[in-house]
Amino acid sequence: MNGKIALEEHWESPDFPATGSHNFTDDEYFSAVQKRLQEFEKRIEDMDRNGIQTSILSLTQPGIEGITDPDRAVKLAKQMNDHAAEFFVSKHPDRFKAFAAVPLQDPEEAAKELERAVKLGFVGALVNGYSNIGDENTAQYLDEPQVRPFWEKAAQLQVPVYLHPRIPLPHQQRIYEGYEGLLGSAWGFGFETATHAIRLMLSGLFDEYPDLTVILGHLGEGLPFTLPRVEHRLRHQRPETHGSHKKAPTEYLRKNFYLTTSGVFRTQALIDTLLEVGSDRILFSVDYPYETMEEISSWFDQCPISETDRYKIGTENASKLFQFNR
Ligand code: MN
């Protein structure tokens, strides 16, 4: 299928090599990934071979969110967004778009930076999970009250926020001891991010801003399968223990979230996602360069869904969401 739009695609600046911190990743794989993160011309050839017209790029995890000093986070987010504009967006405006990096360590500054970036042509923000403030064992989650100015700005600008994974907090990693390979994209990422997304739903954020859009990768980090049971069991938990949401969690999943195919090439999982949220809420993505465009595209182009749905998921939904045809 030609004309696909992919939106969980990552980049890295040589000035801010953000991915060197995980010691559980295979060295050979990682050095190949790092080379591709900093490269844009060959990426276009790869996109051409796999029918991808547009890639929306974001700073790879943990990104700005992993910076413990708020002032440095503010400065570096601006610098990285300027680099993105200069390195690839302005050079290939018809092939590359970008999600802004935002310094959530200071939510007012994050709101300002989002607005500045959107004026520069960025299509929204991508947030790598919780933000460290002070040290690596602190976390600020996106549902927390001090983050509201950022959401207010996203709602006002009508741009989506992609909630991307990062590994669990260092002091919450006991369950992975002896199995550190599970900490990242194999498992810990999804578990951490799904829980973060549930916090957003339960917090009442989407009651306050009903038109807010959050995007999750990896087919919703398992939520199409797990959220119905969360909802079912929460009926029996004391109300004060699960936030102040007005609607059922699955309703937010269907109305406020889009889910991408990043890193997943499993038809059974896609069918479950289709049954839970419908084809209007699913978007094609690769998770390049952690995944190959060939693997995800060759599966997606052939998987047994209707051509109507393939077109929606591959192109149309993203084109509408980001108003590419405006
Ligand atoms: Mn990713």
Image: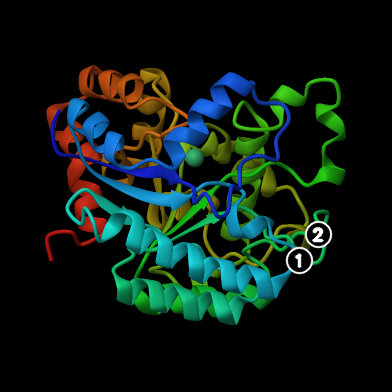
Residue 276 lies, in percent from the top left, at 40, 37
Residue 208 can be seen in this image: no
Mark 1 lies on a secondary structure that is loop
Residue 188 lies, in percent from the top left, at 68, 34
Nearest to the observer: residue 60 or residue 244: 60
Instruction: State the residue position of label 2.
Output: 138
* Type of amino acid at the residue the image marks with label 2: Thr
As drawn, is 173 to the left or to the right of 60?
Answer: right
* Type of amino acid at the residue the image marks with label 1: Ile
| For residue 305, above or below residue 310 | above
Instruction: State the residue position of label 1.
Output: 133
Q: Quadrant of the C terminus?
A: bottom left
As drawn, is 222 to the left or to the right of 82?
Answer: right
The answer to which quarter of the image holds residue 119 is bottom left
Residue 250 lies, in percent from the top left, at 49, 48
What is the C-alpha distance between the residues marked 2 and 1? 6 Å
Q: Quadrant of the N terminus?
A: top left
Q: Residue at x 20, y 62 (%)?
A: 323
Residue 263 lies, in percent from the top left, at 45, 29
- Label 2 Cα neighbours within 10 Å, binned few <14 / some 14-19 / many ≥20: some
